[in-house]
Image: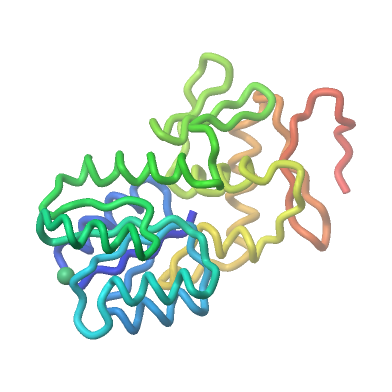
């Protein structure tokens, strides 16, 4: 999942990015309203964390412009004070949730997960296929009763595939979903993640098929002929 953090406070932005990257999200940051507005116009994000008090164009304007383009991605606003008027105005402008500064990073993470769960992308906190189960809230994965250890990047790729199981996904699409602006990962790296995931998912009843010339497809392997294309 790709997340845009719009925050002018360097320290806070770095903290938020660290938390999200650790959880396997692809995170980018904008430090003012214009930059955020531009990023949201040219790129797709699954989630936006938006500070209201920004230099230049403020968070309310960024949010209004986003919604006026028909974008429905979930937005969490950050407000500086426990100001009821700000909260109401934010929710009226199309925010899905708000967090009042200062907050602890654990709360931020929990609220963000709840927001993702409520959004249309993930209707349940649990994603499954075959004998594999991912708990997107606890960020833990199991094959039957055995916990599966995944790196943050492996997690991101697997979550993306599971959310779109049965669909053929190109390497470029997968890369876009799991990398931020600063990462120059070649599409070939995706092949490496796929082969690592295949090893880890050997007894999970899950098949990651290579569709030559197109990309990858994840499906349950029970009753499905194991033919490589
Ligand atoms: Ca600010």
Q: Quick check: 119 above or below 134? A: below
Is residue 143 depicted above or below 229 in this figure? Answer: above
Q: Residue 175 appears in which quarter of the rendering?
A: bottom right
Give x and y (percent) for residue 171: 67, 61
The spot of residue 38 in percent (x, y) is 42, 82
Ligand 1 quadrant assignment: bottom left
Residue at figure coordinates x 33%, y 77% from the top left: 61
Q: Quadrant of residue 214?
A: bottom right
Q: How many discs appear? A: 0
Whether residue 173 is visible here, answered yes or no, is: yes
Left or right of residue 185: residue 167: right
Say how the picture is coloured: rainbow
Residue extending farthest to the top is: 145
Q: Position of residue 30 (x, y in %)?
A: 32, 74
Whether residue 152 sits left or right of residue 160 in the image: it is left
The residue that appears at 22% across and 40% down in the rendered structure is: 106
Q: Residue 136, image x and y in percent?
A: 46, 36
Q: Residue at x 23, y 85 (%)?
A: 56
User: 18 above or below 10?
Assistant: above
Does residue 9 appear in the picture of this structure? no
* Left or right of residue 80, residue 113 in this image: right
The residue positioned 37% from the left and 45% from the top of the image is: 23
């Amino acid at each position: 999942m790709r997340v845009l953090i719009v925050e002018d406070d360097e320290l806070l932005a770095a903290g938020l990015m660290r938390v999200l990257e650790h959880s396997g999200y692809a995170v980018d940051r904008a430090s003012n309203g214009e930059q955020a507005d531009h990023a949201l116009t040219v790129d797709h994000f699954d989630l936006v964390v938006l500070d209201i008090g920004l230099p230049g164009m403020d968070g309310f304007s960024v949010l209004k412009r986003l919604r006026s383009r028909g974008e429905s991605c979930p937005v969490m606003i950050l407000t500086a004070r426990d100001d009821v008027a700000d909260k109401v105005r934010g929710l009226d402008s199309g925010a899905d949730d708000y967090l009042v500064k200062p907050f602890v990073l654990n709360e931020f993470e929990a609220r963000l997960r709840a927001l993702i769960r409520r959004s249309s992308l993930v209707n349940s906190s649990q994603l499954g296929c075959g004998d594999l189960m991912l708990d997107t809230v606890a960020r833990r994965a199991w094959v039957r009763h055995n916990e599966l250890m995944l790196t943050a990047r492996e997690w991101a790729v697997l979550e993306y595939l599971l959310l779109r199981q049965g669909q053929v996904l190109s390497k470029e699409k997968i890369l876009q979903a799991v990398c931020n602006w600063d990462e120059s990962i070649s599409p070939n790296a995706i092949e490496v993640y796929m082969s690592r995931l295949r090893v880890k998912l050997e007894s999970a009843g899950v098949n990651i098929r290579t569709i030559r010339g197109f990309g990858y497809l994840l499906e349950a392997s029970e009753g499905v002929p194991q033919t490589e294309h």
